[in-house]
């Protein structure tokens, strides 16, 4: 996934449910990102609050992930 994917859903997990249907997804910790221009690595991102912000020292700008949403797609 890259900056060009902003606003587009991407598959991050697949479930084999065998008769069950998921109804909610709550992202937690363990996500990672990389600064588009600087290549700065950001690890252990926690998305529990649906938002994450930090500061990229190399690029000298704020970075963030905002308004995380999800959708379930049956395969």
Image (spheres, grey):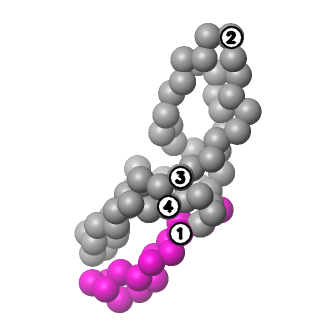
Q: Is residue 38 left or right of residue 70?
A: left
* 38 w.r.t. 1: above or below: below
* Relative image position of residue 55 (x, y in whole percent): 41, 82
Q: Which mark is residue 30?
A: none
Q: Secondary structure at mark 3?
A: loop
Which span of residues is magenta-colored? 52-67
The C terminus, quarter of image? top right
x and y, in percent, of residue 19 in the image: 68, 10
Q: Secondary structure at mark 2?
A: loop
Residue 56: percent from left, percent from top? 35, 81
Secondary structure at badge 4 equals loop
Q: Position of residue 49 (x, y in %)?
A: 63, 63
Lower sequence index among marks 4 and 1: 4
- Among all residues in the image, which is located at the extreme top? 18
Q: Give neighbour class at mark 3: few <14, some 14-19, many 20+ (Cα, 10 Å).
A: few
Task: Please identify the residue farthest to the bottom as the structure is shown.
Answer: 60
Q: Are marks 3 and 4 in contact (CB under 8 Å)?
A: yes
The residue under the point 46% across, 82% down is 62
Q: Which residue is mark 4?
A: 46
Label 3 vs 1, first from the N-terminus: 3
The residue pinned by badge 2 equals 19
Contact, CB < 8 Å: mark 2 with mark 3? Answer: no
Q: Are marks 2 and 1 in contact (CB under 8 Å)?
A: no
Q: Quadrant of residue 35?
A: bottom left
- State the residue position of label 1: 52
First-in-chain label (4 vs 2): 2
Q: Nearer the viewer, mark 4 or mark 1?
A: 4
SS of the residue at dot 1? Answer: strand
């Amino acid at each position: 996934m890259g900056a060009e994917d902003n606003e587009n859903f991407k598959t991050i997990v697949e479930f084999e449910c065998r008769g069950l249907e998921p109804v909610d997804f709550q992202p937690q910790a363990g996500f990672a990102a990389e600064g588009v221009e600087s290549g700065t690595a950001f690890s252990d991102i926690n998305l529990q609050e649906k938002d994450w912000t930090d500061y990229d020292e190399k690029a000298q700008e704020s970075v963030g992930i905002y308004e995380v949403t999800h959708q379930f797609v049956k395969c």
